[in-house]
Image (spheres, grey):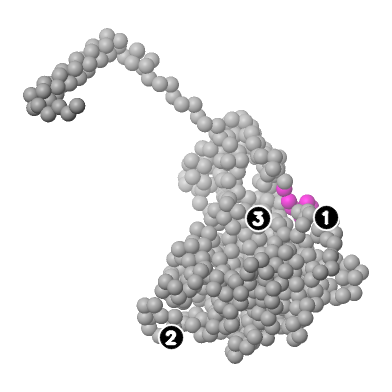
Amino acid sequence: MTISHPGFLDRCHVARQLRFALVCGGMLLALASTGPANLRAADPPPAAATPVSYWKDVRPIFQAHCQGCHQPAKPSGAYVMTEFERLLAGGESGEAAIVPKDAEASDLLQQITPVDGKAAMPQNAPPLSELQLQQIRQWIAEGAVDDTPASARVRYDAEHPPEYPAAPVVTALQYSPDGKLLAVSGFHEVLLHDVATLTDPNAASAGKPSIVGRLVGMSERIESVAFSPDGTRLAVAGGSPGRLGELQVWNVADRKLLVAVAASYDTCYGASWSHDGRLVSFGCPDNTVRAVEAETGKQVLFNGAHNDWVLDTVFSVDSGHLVSVSRDRSMKLTEVATERFIDNITSITPGALKGGLNAVDRHPTQNHLLLGGADGVPKTYRMLRESARVIGDDANLVRQYDSIPGRIYDVAYRADGQQILAGSSFEGQGFVSVYETESGKVVHSLQKLPSPIFSVAFRPDGQQFAVGGFSGTVLVYDNSSGAQVASFVPVPLTEPRVSQAP
């Protein structure tokens, strides 16, 4: 029923106001008669503090700020924070790092608590935030309980390396500058293989192992490996998916971890060295490109010009500029000294590039860039623009090569710059092509390999090249004939793999 008579509406309004006044008046009288003590008793009790979880709250803080320098591969001060028992015990000082239910007696808390704005730890880094300190303090006061899930209690180090019931995907491989070693990604580690043994049929038939080193670190997933220009160090980009990214720098000769840098919230990509071995660059899933000092891990470049994950990086010949490629379909140029974005090297016109860019390499002696991505077309670009920018142009493009089926995941220049190499994935199969750099002529075309190819590398002398991917097998080819000269699983399997005839 609709009521529209104005007198009726006015009376209703007055009645509502009167009822409201009576109710409020009654409440005031009731409050006046009860007194302040009763008012306090009526207040809800304060909420109990939520218990702090080691696994969910405290461990991520240690992982991001402490474990890079306090892990089995790099136990600074003889203190390891990746294993719970050693986390509590402390290091060379002899003091208990954590005393359950006694935060003030816990040496770790004293080390990380700022005094006059400075804290002893993390070393050479800003102090932890007050919220982080409070969480650690509360966790200790509550008993420092280890609530790590059983499934996450497995730990790996040089004495307890991973075991492999099956070969993991090969996401990265690279030859050392002298051609004697081949570094291949594994799970929580990079494996160093002796190249002479790999390609010696007598050694293979005699069962002589080619693995000469296992660089076991904190990162579960390895996305990129890069030898320093002099071959003495190895940069490794990776991390723990969905939790943490990490850059590692290893001493190749003694297999020791020199630097570990935590970065971003997921695995890092595309490690690259400056020409003098002073800096290492890498890309992150937070859309940033970064560079750190190889000796200290100190960050010297941070740029967020990209709009999606940065998947690969490379320095200019003199390391004055840094190039990065991303899932956002662009290749960008950054000035190292100023950390300033300079230019989009590729066209950013919608439709000019189809899909993300996965890989970039630089000519050994020129500022020319080899690019691979989702369109399956290897391309070379000038790093530095020679003409005025016109919106929508692709003026830096030097050459396009014959396409490869599917998506290109990795590219490489030969050490003399005379050839380029590209590997791709399409419908569960792998494709690899070798081209002459100047003419674009296809030298070798490997079609329909048994599994997708994710990483490729020339041996420095140019006589061989290696590829790896989803199958977990590394294939080595003679660059003169294109014939396969070796096929091997780069990790030690717990059960020998049985070869089957096709």
Q: Is residue 327 above or below residue 478?
A: above
Which residue appears farthest toward the right when viewing the image?
206
Q: Secondary structure at mark 2?
A: loop
Name the residue that disc number 2 marks: 386
Name the residue that disc number 3 marks: 219
- What residue is shown at x 75% (from left), y 72% (from top)? 475
Q: Secondary structure at mark 3?
A: strand
Q: Position of residue 261 (x, y in %)?
A: 59, 58
Indicate which disc residue 88 carries.
none
Q: In front: 455, or 118?
A: 455
Quarter of the image for the N terminus: give it.
Answer: top left
Residue 469: quarter of image: bottom right
Amino acid type at mark 2: Glu
* Mark 2 in CB contact with mark 3 (< 8 angstroms): no
Of the numbered discs 2 and 1, the one sitting upstream in the chain is 2
Q: Secondary structure at mark 1?
A: loop
Q: Which residues are magenta?
A: 155-160
Q: Position of residue 135 (x, y in %)?
A: 53, 38
Amino acid type at mark 1: Thr
For marks 3 and 1, give the one nearer the viewer.
1
Residue 11: quarter of image: top left
Quarter of the image for the C terminus: give it.
Answer: bottom right
